[in-house]
Image: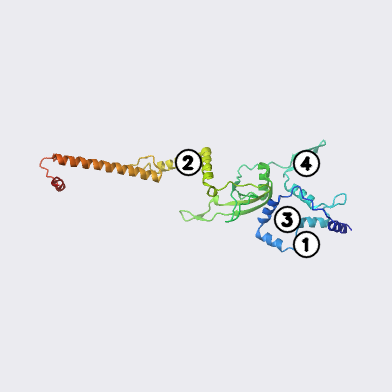
Amino acid sequence: MQALCRVARRLYSTQPPERAASALPNLAAAARDASAPMAVRERRERKRAHLKPPTNSDLTPSEYSGYRRALAKGELMDQRGRDMTEAEWLDALNERRTRLRGLKVTDNHGEKELQVVGQRIYLPNIMFRMVRNHTPTGKPYNPYEATFRVPMSVTKTDVRSYLSAVYGVKTTYIRTANYFSPLYRRYNGAKTTRSYRTYKRAVVGLVNPFYYPQAMEDMTAEDRKKRMEWLNEKFALDALKRWRRHELVRTSLSGSKNWRFTGHLRRDKILKAVARSRSRMLREVEEVKEELADKRARGVPIFSDTKRGSQPSKWREALHAN
């Protein structure tokens, strides 16, 4: 009888379905469905039509199957004999998902208090590194996703709790993938891995959009210039780069023979210094030539043999003959 009443209530209902208060925005829900793995999408497409959620439903196919299963078992009936709607069931599910683990509500003389269950755990050595989402060529950037590089020991529950407790970020889904470092051959022939090449990637779905800062190559010339000025003002990148080059040259060439630091590190400045030295040498050669020509015109000997019994060389005789 209850099943007939439920069917009749659905058939003769003329009002649109109630929307859950904790339901995702349309764009966030579309991003969540688009980012589902291909195997999951293919499995959902093979379902029969009556097992799929309606087009205006806020539930995913998995949530819709869970709701129908609980409804058939009679687990959603309240004290008045009324079944929970999809919106009410989704709100209760999201409230349970976003609850703070390790806490329980206690009654202290009629006042509700939060009591810590178990032992507090602090994670001081865990680092979450946010990176840009992988965007195929020609596809727009998805602002409802965020990608992190986390240690291998971090789980999906840790990621959700960390983002919620520290930054207050609400998440819709978390997908992880492990990346292992390839083998590298050492100088002695042994094979080893590199720790920085081993990490776990966590792709997190967001309720509110987050726009990652635009890449330098995607900016206009004016925006790129403003960005570099701001970076130099805040972090002194140019000064740090010059200091690194100076230290590299000082530590690598200071022990060389007849080396002295000229103050130039860039190739263009080095070439300019070489050109100035060459022009100065050519100018001195021209001055010497003019001086020799002047002495030759006045009949002043250019070379004199001061040693006794020394014979003038052939090239000196040729020079005097000219």
Earlier sequence position, callout 2 versus callout 4: 4
Point 33% across, 44% down: residue: 275
Which quarter of the rendered picture does the N terminus lie within?
bottom right
Crowd class of label 4 (few under 14; some 14 to 19; many from 20; radius 10 Å): few
Q: Which residue is mark 4?
A: 105
Give the label on residue 50, or none.
1
Earlier sequence position, callout 1 versus callout 4: 1
For label 1, the SS is helix
Earlier sequence position, callout 2 versus callout 1: 1
Give the label on residue 238, or none.
2
Find the distance from the CA under tag 2 to the CA under tag 4: 55 Å
Q: Is residue 269 above or below residue 141?
A: above
Q: Which residue is mark 3?
A: 60
For label 3, the SS is loop
Nearer to us: label 2 or label 4: 2
Find the distance from the CA under tag 2 to the CA under tag 1: 64 Å
Point 71% across, 62% down: residue: 45
Direction from residue 292 to residue 66 in the image, left or right: right
Question: Mark 2–mark 3 contact, CB under 8 Å?
Answer: no
Question: Mark 2–mark 4 contact, CB under 8 Å?
Answer: no
Count of picture labels: 4
Point 78% across, 55% down: residue: 67
Q: Disc 4 residue type?
A: Val
Crowd class of label 1 (few under 14; some 14 to 19; many from 20; radius 10 Å): few
Earlier sequence position, callout 2 versus callout 3: 3
Q: Is residue 302 visible?
A: no
Point 51% across, 43% down: residue: 225
> Looking at the picture, how far across and down is residue 305, in whole percent?
13, 41
Q: Disc 3 residue type?
A: Thr
> Looking at the picture, how far across and down is residue 294, in whole percent?
18, 40
